[in-house]
Amino acid sequence: MSYKKKNIINISIVAVIFIGMAIYFFSVENADNIIKVMKTINIWWMIFGLVLIIIYWLLEALSLYIVEKKIYKDQKYINSLRVSMIGQLFNSITPFSSGGQPMQAVAMKMEGKQVSDSATILLIKFIVYQAVLVLFSLGIIIFEYSYFKNLVTGFTRLALIGFLVNLVVIIALILIGAKSNFVKKILAFFYKLLGKIKILKEVDRKLNNLNLSVDNFHEKFKIIKKEKKMVLKLAIVTFVQLIAFFSITYAVYRMFGQDSVSIVKIISAQAFLSMIMAFVPIPGAGIAAEGGFYIIFNTFFSEETINMAILFWRLYTFYLPILVGAVFLIKVRKENNDVDILEKAEETINDEL
């Protein structure tokens, strides 16, 4: 299946989820309650929620810019912002947010950057982001796990699984970067084992390709060890970025005139929800995101406002990035004579990636 067809299917899934959410929302909420709740909304907190998502986007672009600037000295922030927002769009409409990085690599190629450089930039950014996310989540688990364990039965176990998945990813990346020969021996053992039991074919060829990828990653990882100052900057920006993103839920909470729960508890709850959403194989973690929000936040929001809160939260964190990202995508297409960026992605993946 072509890359373009996959994205059309993903967009269709997003549309179905949106329609399903709208049907659910209007089936459980009567018009009188919607009007009543809308009248009580604090406009300043609603605006602040919008400001927070914009700050998140700007910091996301800044983290990309920090790495790009190391390789391309004449890099402009506005170009990093364009690439970043295209990533936001495709992260939202693909399972596991897997489509963002390939499309960012294509957007950077259209700016004249080498695909190998783009891959390095995105890899460094991803590793630092994962490391900061794991440390952030670890802090939440240490200080807030017992509170949420008693509050929401079974939910924190899923969050713990999500944390462990992210932890395994970052440990694997560090091992490949620091101990590539050790990793290649482990991979060779499993590949040969799978070959013997007839699960894997062409073992030698596939293992050789995998070893080349490991060696390539190992070389790129050296940049992280060398550029400690850049990595520290990137980590700080990422940490603030996570705070801004998780605080959007607090803005939604205050929007409906509620203030009995601290911002720390709201951020912690949102971090737990994000850990679960990370391994849901649906674009935007659809259904699981809304359901998870209801399960964990219905103890914070009143019965009259919880469904409206879900709606506003998803508008901020999911549907708005799609709309704004699409605007940036259209702009990039116009600047490149209406080139089909999805077809360009297909060519790039086949020819170079």
Image: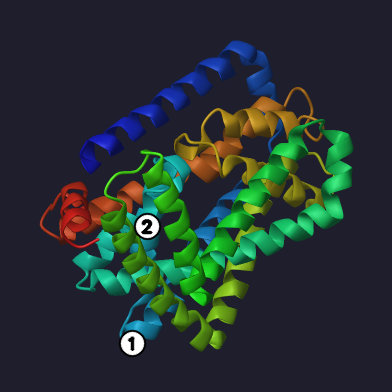
Q: Nearer the viewer, residue 142 or 10?
A: 142
* Callout 2: SS: helix
Mark drawn on residue 90: none
Decide: few, some or many residues near mark 1? Use Cα within 10 Å; few <14, some 14-19, many ≥20: few
User: In the figure, is residue 292 to the left or right of 175?
Assistant: right
Residue shown at 24%/50% (left/top)? 330
Which residue sits furthest left?
337
Decide: few, some or many residues near mark 2? Use Cα within 10 Å; few <14, some 14-19, many ≥20: many
Q: Amino acid at mark 2?
A: Gln
Residue shown at 34%/78% (left/top)? 76
Which residue sits furthest front?
196
Residue 246 x %, y %:
66, 52
- Using the rendered view, name the quadrant where residue 198 is placed: top left
Residue shown at 20%/51% (left/top)? 341
- Using the rendered view, name the quadrant where residue 169 is placed: bottom right
Q: Nearer the viewer, residue 123 or 266?
A: 123
Answer whether residue 43 is visible to the viewer in this image. Answer: no
User: In the figure, is residue 4 to the left or right of 37?
Assistant: left
221 vs 163: above or below: below
Residue 67 x %, y %:
43, 77
Check the picture and name the quadrant holding the N terminus: top left
Front label number (2 vs 1)? 2
Kindly identify which residue carries mark 2. Answer: 101
Kindly identify which residue carries mark 1. Answer: 73
126 vs 1: above or below: below
* Mark positioned earlier in the residue sequence (2 or 1): 1
206 vs 249: above or below: below
> How far is mark 2 from mark 1, CA to CA?
22 Å
